[in-house]
Image (cartoon, helix red, strand yellow):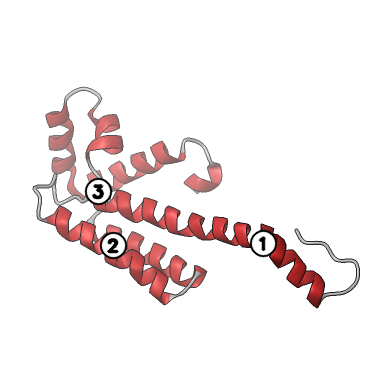
Amino acid sequence: AIELNNVQVEKNRAAFEWGRRAAHDLAAVRKLAQSQGRGAAETASSKIISLHTPKALGTLIDKRADYLAAWQNAAYAERYRVLVSQVRVAESALDSIDGQLPLTEAVAKNLHKLMAYKDEYEVARLYSDPAFIEKLKANFEGDWKLH
């Protein structure tokens, strides 16, 4: 619903996650907000912490890996999983705020974008290659258009 509404999606997601987090552990949210001082909610939601629990982060990673497997193949999705897993292991070794893994979450989201967009650009590059048009002309007769 937040995405369909398309109004300040990231801020609304952050607010929703803060609410979920508060419902789960209100004391931890209050403690974090107090430790950050004024403007803590905005700062924390955008810069300091991730609001995904480890289970939700795993779901986020699984969903994106499934998309990449469908987009290309299982090996491509596995490359994604391996890199995100390496980041997760390294970040888990560091001190974290309430068990959060904001770097892992950022890598999971942005690596997925990069891997999916890269393919779109590669397909566009291949389709715009004059050799591709020549192959089509050799295989198809009549009045056709490529869109």
In x, y percent, where is residue 8?
Answer: 47, 35
Spatial separation of the CA atoms under disc 3 and disc 1:
36 Å
SS category of the residue bearing label 2: helix
In x, y percent, where is residue 146?
Answer: 77, 61
In x, y percent, where is residue 83?
Answer: 28, 62
Q: Which amino acid type is shown beneath numbered disc 2?
A: Leu
Of the 4 image quadrants, the one containing the C terminus is bottom right
Query: Residue at (70%, 65%) from the top-left corner?
Result: 131
Contact between marks 3 and 1 (CB within 8 A): the answer is no
Give the number of the disc on residue 103: 3
| Camera-side mark, 3 or 1 | 1
Query: Residue at (15%, 36%) from the top-left corner?
Result: 32
| Camera-side mark, 2 or 3 | 2
Q: Residues within 10 Å of mark 1 (few under 14, many from 20)?
A: some
Q: Nearer the viewer, residue 37 or 30?
A: 37
SS category of the residue bearing label 3: helix
Query: Residue at (61%, 57%) from the top-left corner?
Result: 125
Q: Which amino acid type is shown beneath numbered disc 1?
A: Tyr
Q: Nearer the viewer, residue 76 or 131?
A: 131
| Camera-side mark, 1 or 2 | 1
Rendered position, 130 above or below 12: below
Q: Nearer the viewer, residue 80 or 130?
A: 130
**Residue identifier under label 1:** 127
SS category of the residue bearing label 1: helix
| N-terminal-most mark, 2 or 3 | 2
**In the image, is 106 to the left or to the right of 114?**
left
Tell me how many marks there are.
3
Rendered position, 103 above or below 68: above
Q: Which amino acid type is shown beneath numbered disc 3?
A: Leu
| N-terminal-most mark, 3 or 1 | 3
**Residue identifier under label 2:** 83
Rendered position, 72 above or below 104: below
